[in-house]
Image: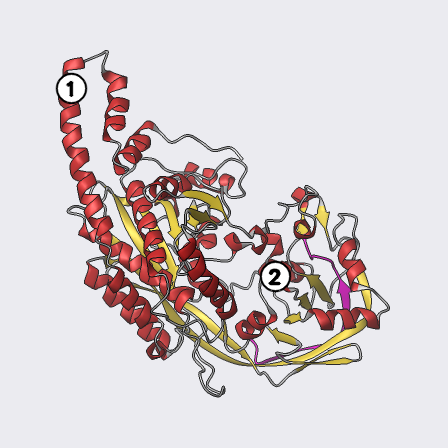
Amino acid sequence: MKKTTLSLSIAALLLTACGDNDSAKKADASQTAEKAPVKVEQSEKASDKTENKHQNNFLTAYDNIDLDIYKDRVKTLSSDEFEGRSPATEGGRKTSEYLKEQFKAVGAEPGNGDSYFQQVPLISIEADADMQLQLGDATLEYSKDFVAGTSQTVESISLKDSDLVYVGYGVVAPEYDWNDYEGVDMEGKTAVILINDPGFAQPDAGIFQGKAMTYYGRWTYKYEEAARQGAAGAIIIHDTAPASYGWNVVSSSWSGPQYHLPSTGDTPKLDAEMWITLDQAHSLFKQSGLDLAQLQKDALSKDFKPVPLDSKASVDIKNTIQESQSANVIATIPGKKRPDEHVIYMAHWDHLGSRDGMEGDHIYNGAIDNATGTAGIISIAQAFKQLPEAPDRSVTFVAVTAEEQGLLGSKYFAANPTVPLTQIVGAFNIDSMNVSGRMKDFTVVGYPKSEVESYVEQAAKRQGRELRPESAPERGGYYRSDHFSLAKFGVPAVYGGGGTEFRDDADKDAADKWTKMRGECYHSLCDEYHEDWVWQAALDDIKIFFEAGYLLSNSEDFPNWYEGTEFRSIRDESMKQK
């Protein structure tokens, strides 16, 4: 993957922010010394004063990011008062109002005209949990063995004796000469699909992107493709390793209200979207005299052909439907020189809400996911406002709703941007910050993808940290958070935080406890605030994001995706139309 070189103006700015003023002066002087040495000397002195002033101002704001204030915001957002921050609930409304007041208090202006809110229309579809899935001669229990729902806005819908067809990974990818649906008519049938993509099981085979998940591995894609093929239903087989999360995540995430954006009517949808456990999948294939393990191996070849099963699927889904809206909260700091150009910071404020029918604790507080990130962008806004003058470009903060329901808030923002997408020079997304231990490196998910990473790289150097890719690219992390909504429209976006190597034994010892808790509590009731987290680790990352945005907001460059990335052509084409 080819990386492009930063322009000289950006290189000088980066050197300045790191305190290498002599190097920056020499770089500037070397271009003009032969033409006008006396004038260059005078300009150099003036430049030195300006650089020192900007550097001192920046470092004051950088060093004054208040950890206690940040912690208090995380604690507040993850408190029971906000009822798990579910969209279109009283807890969600309280959350958006709180965020508006916080942005207003730090001095950021309304980012959607004269309003801090961008109302996102939502359709809530809650499937009645009193359902069963019949697969051949087996009756499956809801939540324990399967989950099911529909994205169609109907009060009830049924699959009746729908023929089951195993379609491997359910991928149609012409660029890889891959078609798992080849030769089968899926009309009215139900696809049975493996999670992830073929590269996961054979990372050295040179197919797809190896161990790193592509969008073809995401469950959202699998339902979309099955619908395009004319299927009535789709069943994804859960498997913890390739999914990167346990069955408990599927069960908790799919229960309760599921939100959707209003349908435009031009996108096909399945009647039933389902998951089953791996144990139930093995039983299903045995009914047809088939071995799932062997068929998983068969699906790794582009010569794979769909396999009809000697079983049918039936399920009745009854829905409670509500139309509602929830707010993206948008605030901005107008730039002093090029206010029409924007640097974006993004974090999702929503979580899973509460389950009133449960005994004991029933609130999904979502402290790490994502009170930490939401509080982080407020702290960054406050740091920008501590600068004596605004940056050259505008800096806009977007706290989006309904991420947990499929990135809906960011999808709506990307489709209905408050500023032209071609004027967004780059975006930074913060989702679930590191509170386990301080790091020697800094993880960038999907690394390397865009030139925006160069600004993060330079900011990380102040802390002696270097950029590294995520340790588990098979999770498809780049396609699972809100920056992806902007990336699909070509906007270069970075998603990252934390790292892979701890600074010392004390940080490693602390992380042994908190990393385990973080994994166990993802999308669970125990994702709650802890006073004894390693909060300095989160503050380290906040400072990196602040400096990266500071550099980009004072730059004249428009970063792009690196050559060979899937979004490069989209950005190139959109900039031609600018």
> Residue visible at 70% across and 69% down?
278
Displayed quadrant of residue 21: top left
Q: What residue is pinned by disc 1? A: 41
Neighbours of disc 2 within 10 Å: few (<14), some (14-19), many (20+): many
From the viewer's side, name the closer residue of 312 and 532.
532
Q: Amino acid at mark 1?
A: Glu
* Quadrant, the N terminus: top right
x%, y% of residue 525? 47, 76
Q: Residue furthest right?
A: 289
Displayed quadrant of residue 228: bottom right
The image shows a total of numbered marks equal to 2
x%, y% of residue 137? 80, 80
* Quadrant, the C terminus: top left
Q: What residue is pinned by disc 2? A: 243
Residue span colored magenta: 153-171
Q: Secondary structure at mark 2?
A: helix
x%, y% of residue 463? 33, 45
Image side of residue 193 versus residue 375, left or right: right
Label placed on residue 199: none
